[in-house]
Image (spheres, rainbow, N blue to C red):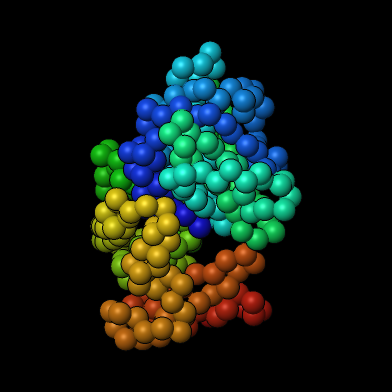
Amino acid sequence: MPEMPEVQGLVEFLRERVTGLSITRVSVANIAALKTYDPPVQALQGAEITGAARHGKFIDLSTTGTDAAPHLVFHLAKAGWLRWYDALPTTLIKPGRTPIALRVALSDGSGFDLTEAGTKKSLAVYVVRESADVPGIARLGPDPLEAGFDLETFAGLLAGRRTQIKGVLRDQMIIAGVGNAYSDEILHAAKMSPYALASSLSPEDVERLYAAMTATLAEAVAAASGKPPAELKDAKRRGMQVHGRRGEVCPVCGDTVRSVFFADNSLEYCPTCQTGGKILADRRLSRLLK
């Protein structure tokens, strides 16, 4: 799933590449991906793109030049991605027989597809007058890389939450932009169990977690910066210490990276670094090792 660093990389790429270009055609191949109807998607045709922005894990392309002047906002969900073309293919898209959800053609002949792999389709596209009209954006918590997001702000978000810290980091209404992968990386860097309760953390724990979060995200954003969409996924994988590395050696201590599986995802952690050597039982089993 694309998270803050990869989404920021996509935003920077799009900002540089499409600002000032006009949208000549928008083709919806998966109607279920389009979550809005007013303004209609056709309102984007002829609009000039004026900028690109990130809201959590949402990408927002602003436009001008039409009566509606809508925003094209999209969320790539778990299996979505943006495929860029310097010269957009002229082949017709056949709805229902393609991973393409949306195709956008631009005035210089370039363009992009929003694609989604697999059968569970969650990619979402919105055409709205204001980005805050997207419910998911309106509900977002603060962004951890914004200037005002300091240690005091972070501590306030955690205070009194009897929720596992892994879930707190992933909750977009608490902290925007962090998902499954980077929550694993942040907790590994902080040497903290994913099952620790947010309310039980000491001030020292909170400070250590805040430092790990800001450093991990800042480094990942820097690594993604300047890369085209086709290279961002590999860059993300190369930067991971534990996420997606089950059975490999922890680069910090040499222990084996372990996994806990859930219904539709998993978490990865290092027992030596994070849980005092204890192995967390797989959620596919009947109980957890505390």
**x, y percentage for residue 75?**
53, 44
Identify the residue shown where x is 69% and y is 59%. 119
Identify the residue shown where x is 45% and y is 20%. 64
Furthest residue to the right? 96
Q: Quick check: can you spot residue 77? A: no
Q: Could you tell me how many numbered marks the image carries?
A: 0
Left or right of 134 in this view: 252:
left
Identify the residue shown where x is 36% and y is 44%. 13
Left or right of 30 in this view: 134:
left
**x, y percentage for residue 11?**
39, 42
Furthest residue to the front? 90
Q: Quick check: can you spot residue 97? A: yes
Identify the residue shown where x is 33% and y is 54%. 227
Furthest residue to the top? 67
Using the image as rendered, state which of residue 160 and residue 171 is in the foreground.
171
Left or right of 223 in this view: 161:
right
Q: Is residue 96 above or below residue 59?
A: below
Using the image as rendered, state which of residue 194 and residue 140 is in the foreground.
140
Left or right of 45 in this view: 231:
left
**x, y percentage for residue 59?**
46, 40
Q: Is residue 45 above or below residue 98?
A: above
Determine which quarter of the picture holds residue 42: top right
Using the image as rendered, state which of residue 174 and residue 98 is in the foreground.
98
**x, y percentage for residue 50?**
39, 26
